Amino acid sequence: MRSTDALSYHAESKRMRSTEFPDKVLLAIESSCDDTSAAVIKGNKILANFITNQEVHAKYGGVVPELASREHQKNIVPVVHSALEEASIGLDDLDGIAFTQGPGLMGSLMVGTSFAKSLALSLDVPLLGVHHMHAHILAHFIEDAGEKLPRFPFLCLTVSGGHTQIVKVESPSKLTILGETLDDAAGEAFDKSAKLLGLPYPGGPLVDKYAELGNPHAFEFSISNLEGFNFSFSGFKTSVLRLLQKEMKADPQFIENNRDDLCASVRFTIVNSLIKQFKKAAKAEGINQLAIAGGVSANSLLRSELQRLCNENTWDCFIPKFAYCTDNAAMIAITGMFQMMENKKVELSAKASARLPF
């Protein structure tokens, strides 16, 4: 991008930040999995974004749905109170309540949905049901999400523990899946590989940490090479398991002695697959604005490889700040704000959905 174009783009982004969003205040609630989060937004500026993690799941090696819903019940009131207090916003100042309607764990979603509906009813304000994966993508429009805002259309690689998708984003409400995983999500591949390596849950961030010290080409793992823009990671996990079983017969300390190289090789294989399909989609669609979203977008190699891909092709790159990568209510807030702008409210009869259609 030429310097004059860059200055013009930056100026346009600033105008979008200051003028496109209404002077409204929303409270948002996110409870799709094991994090209870509440945020307050005004326009597209986040005034508060509180997240309470559930450490109870660590000893089980994964999220236990029943325990998650119980923890949400304990956490939701203090988390909402903290968000409102941090934002210096009273209940009477709220213009609407946004909440995660799905997809996610049904018990967890029901806690957030019930709370949001009750509060909206008591305050007589609009209720805004948000799709969790839409919210990950639209988090890029939060005022401090990045240096500039994406322009429509753009492509977003959305990678999390439950989803891996390439999405064409033509407007805040027109999002089309171009490709997705046919089995396991990238985040699940990271976590299950980490479990095979004896790393505690959640293992994905630990794989990323140890990978920085290892050789990404030390071990070769197979991964499906699909036509189109879809992904498959089930065969990859099997490949990791078979390598470990073979090597540990000869050396019981194989994992301990090769931890960093194993992590680096796992990370390289997964990220390389993601970037390869994303590049293919961008060229096929003729779109030069690329973004990433979701929990796995915090992965350091994925972030650097996307930046490298965009630099090589003179494409615009959008990488969210870490606070907006993992599940958080700020992304629910900005999506709720878009829906308020389009008058897309839901009724009090709205129900949570574990498999809410995209």
Image: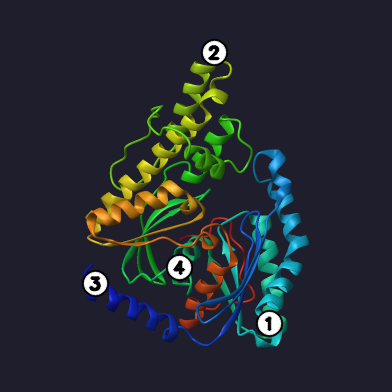
Disc 2 to disc 1, how far (Cα)?
A: 61 Å
In the picture of the structure, the residue carrying the numbered disc 1 is: 88
Q: Amino acid at mark 4?
A: Leu
Contact, CB < 8 Å: mark 4 with mark 3?
Answer: no
Q: Would residue 170 appear left or right of 266 to someone viewing this image?
A: left
Q: Quadrant of the N terminus?
A: bottom left
Residue occupying image coordinates x 28% and y 42%: 227
Q: Amino acid at mark 1?
A: Ser
User: Residue 249 got which mark?
Assistant: 2
In the picture of the structure, the residue carrying the numbered disc 4 is: 138
Mark 1 burial class by Cα count in 10 Å: few <14, some 14-19, many 20+: few
Kindly tell me whether residue 314 is visible in this rendering: yes
The residue furthest top is 250
**Of the image marks 4 and 3, the number of the one nearer the N terminus:** 3
Q: Is residue 228 above or below residue 93?
A: above
Disc 2 to disc 4, how far (Cα)?
A: 48 Å
Residue occupying image coordinates x 39% and y 37%: 269
**Of the image marks 1 and 3, the number of the one nearer the N terminus:** 3
Residue 261, position as x, y percentages in the image:
46, 30
Q: Amino acid at mark 3?
A: Ser
**Of the image marks 4 and 1, the number of the one nearer the N terminus:** 1
Q: Would residue 86 appear left or right of 11 to someone viewing this image?
A: right
Q: Count the labels in the image.
A: 4
Mark 3 against mark 2, which lies toward the viewer? Answer: 3
User: Residue 3 got which mark?
Assistant: 3
Q: Nearer the viewer, residue 232 or 36?
A: 36
Disc 4 to disc 3, how far (Cα)?
A: 27 Å
Mark 4 against mark 3, which lies toward the viewer? Answer: 3
Mark 2 against mark 1, which lies toward the viewer? Answer: 1
Q: Secondary structure at mark 4?
A: helix
Residue occupying image coordinates x 55% and y 35%: 194
